[in-house]
Amino acid sequence: MSLAIRGAVGGGDAARVSHRGLGYLLRRYAQNRLAAIGLVVFVAIVLTAVFAPWLAPYSPIKTDFAAYLRPPGGAHVLGTDELGRDVLSRLIYGTRASLEAGVISVGLAIAVGLPLGLAAGYYRGFIGDVLMRFTDAMLAFPPLILALAVAAVLGPGLAKAMIAIAVVLTPVFMRITRAQVLQQRAREYIEAVRALGAWDRRIIWRHLLPNSMAPIVVQGSLNIAGAIITEATLSFLGLGTQPPTPSWGSMLNGAQQYLTQAPWLALWPGAAIALTVFAVNVAGDGLREIWDPGRADFSGAPRDAASPLSQVPLRRYHLSERAAASAGAVPEARGWCLRGSTASG
Amino acid sequence: MIPVLFFVSLIIFVLINVIPGDPARVLLGEEATPEALATLRHVLGTDRPLPVQYARWIGGMVEGNFGKSFKDNTPVLPTLLQKIPVTAELTVLALCIAWLIAIPAGIVAAWRQRTLTDYGASAAALIGLSVPNFWLGIMAIYLFAVHLHWLPASGWVPLTEDASRNLRAMVMPACVLGLVLAAVVMRQLRSSMIEVLSADFVRTAKAKGLGGRVVLIRHTLRNAVIPVITVMGIQMGTLLGGAVITETIFAVPGLGQLAVNSIYNRDSPMLEGVVMFSALSILLVNLLVDIVYSLIDPRIKLSEELS
């Protein structure tokens, strides 16, 4: 976040903007009501995961055969499952598997994909070519089928499912990072930094990376939604979270067999997944709108081309050169880049 | 495309063969004698060095020999060829459903931008993106099969045997698969329509007195459809992945179900075949998309590298 704000500083009023940075971003974010709601819901879900032991009325794994397949109501607000376990408690604990899967697998994918993408974009030639052919090949697989194959090879378990999802997402981040680097490295400020004698390593980490970060963050936030669905799918097929640990996907797997007797078992976990994914999607859309106004898509917030943030050289991970032109000539981040390198150089 | 295919095959091979796990032991169980294991390894070819195994696998595929299933020793290719039409039917039906919903919805949402219609359609699309398709499938089974008895939850028969029963069994899987795609296509179409609607040539067309419908369809839609086709190409993979889920839930014996079963049976040659085929079909779809581009828009000759 702080990197993005630094990048956001145009030529002159650096101190002022960075001063109001985060608050300004949040205010602008909150103007998009849907995105703000998404963020609030997401935070609520995160809190649910963190405080699950205090929120859950029962143990999520304790079986009670006397209370087998109870319908919602009474002592068990959302009913009980085929082993007499409290559905609400399992639902609450299930947030953990979903959020872990979403955040960790995307984090892992960025941790691997970002350096590889930087390398492929900066050092073109043989290594870059091989890396890109490799991502082409990875992207030629249907994502879910590749995740299934990797998960099948690694064996069942939440951690392994997360690795499988990260494997699928890594080439996505390699591509985006590389596209960003290709765009940034042709800019004058990079030339200027190089003329000042900066080494490759410094150019890559201090200049190319911060300026390429926004689309990666946006993409990452949206991919969390996909990762949550994929984890649920893998668990549904028996390859993700293993019993008795509760996860929404495996709850749905169990519910399938009792659809005629206990349809409520299938209702709640799916609704929980949908709500979480919806929240992440709209929250991510909101981020994209701030950083990538040219592609502003959903939501009623008006396009605000006059906003200082929309003129930041931080957007466009799509092919919208035209949107760039329409957002006004983009003031380069030369100012802070040069300042950064002379201050410490 | 050939170098990509080479990497694809290499990834599949490394993924499935280099990682520890001895198929002979999986097949024979823990109590197998060392002699029996050695014999089976020799029969399967897994006692050879990996590069030799890879070369044999590739060589076989070029000749149309995808190896034999570990499970019942039947050749992989005929099984694949038997399943492909089933999944093809499912995905084509799903595509049709997606288009039927998404194209009108996208056009109307863009045309009536910032009205209740637009917000309704856009919200529906956003919800469609958020609902996991296996849950949608289960809910559809509960509503239409268990509760209302309108449609069968399973009971697929070949199209050639009984077309009406086949279609009845396909309705739910195709809808479930198509709805998510409809959401993606609708969103893309809406935003590219909006972009094109603000272009100068659209204003010119309106200014010279052309009717709203002509401007909308002939001028706007035609220019807005390119990114939509790109998205369709990208979504082909999602569609095949979705087929895995819908075929499993609705007991449709296609490629997706085959993939899941070969995972459960630890049947690597079969899994390799399915994954290889699905990657191949995606590459072919993307090639097709490139060709369609140049048909729709003669200005496009090469795909841009940066995108």
Image: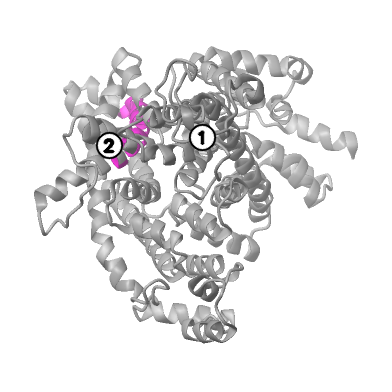
In depth, the one of B292 and B139 nearer the eye is B139
Q: Is residue B186 magenta?
A: yes
Q: Secondary structure at mark 2?
A: helix
Of badges 2 and 1, the one in the foreground is 2
> Where is residue B134 shown, x and y percent of the image?
38, 40
**Quadrant, the C terminus of chain A:** top right
Stretch of the chain drawn in magenta: B177-201
The chain containing the residue under callout 1 comes to A
Q: Which mark is residue A225?
A: 1
The chain containing the residue under callout 2 comes to B
Alpha carbon separation for disc pair 2 and 1:
25 Å
Around disc 1, counting alpha carbons within 10 Å, would you say few (fewer than 14), some (14 to 19), or many (20 or more)?
Answer: many
In depth, the one of A206 and B159 nearer the eye is B159
Residue B203 appearing in the image: no
**Amino acid type, callout 1:** Ala
> What residue do we see at 70% from left, 30% from top?
A7
Q: Which residue is mark 2?
A: B141
> Is residue B175 left or right of A91 when viewed as pictured?
left
> Where is residue A316 shown, x and y percent of the image?
54, 35
> Where is residue B123 shown, x and y percent of the image?
37, 22
Q: Is residue B192 magenta?
A: yes
Within the image, what quadrant is residue B130 found in?
top left
Q: Are marks 2 and 1 in contact (CB under 8 Å)?
A: no
> Where is residue A197 shown, x and y percent of the image?
84, 48
**Amino acid type, callout 2:** Ile
Around disc 2, counting alpha carbons within 10 Å, would you say few (fewer than 14), some (14 to 19), or many (20 or more)?
Answer: many
> Is residue A301 left or right of B74 when viewed as pictured?
right
Q: What count of labels does the image hold?
A: 2
Within the image, what quadrant is residue B59 found in?
bottom left
Q: Secondary structure at mark 1?
A: helix
**Quadrant, the N terminus of chain A:** top right
In depth, the one of A245 and A318 nearer the eye is A245
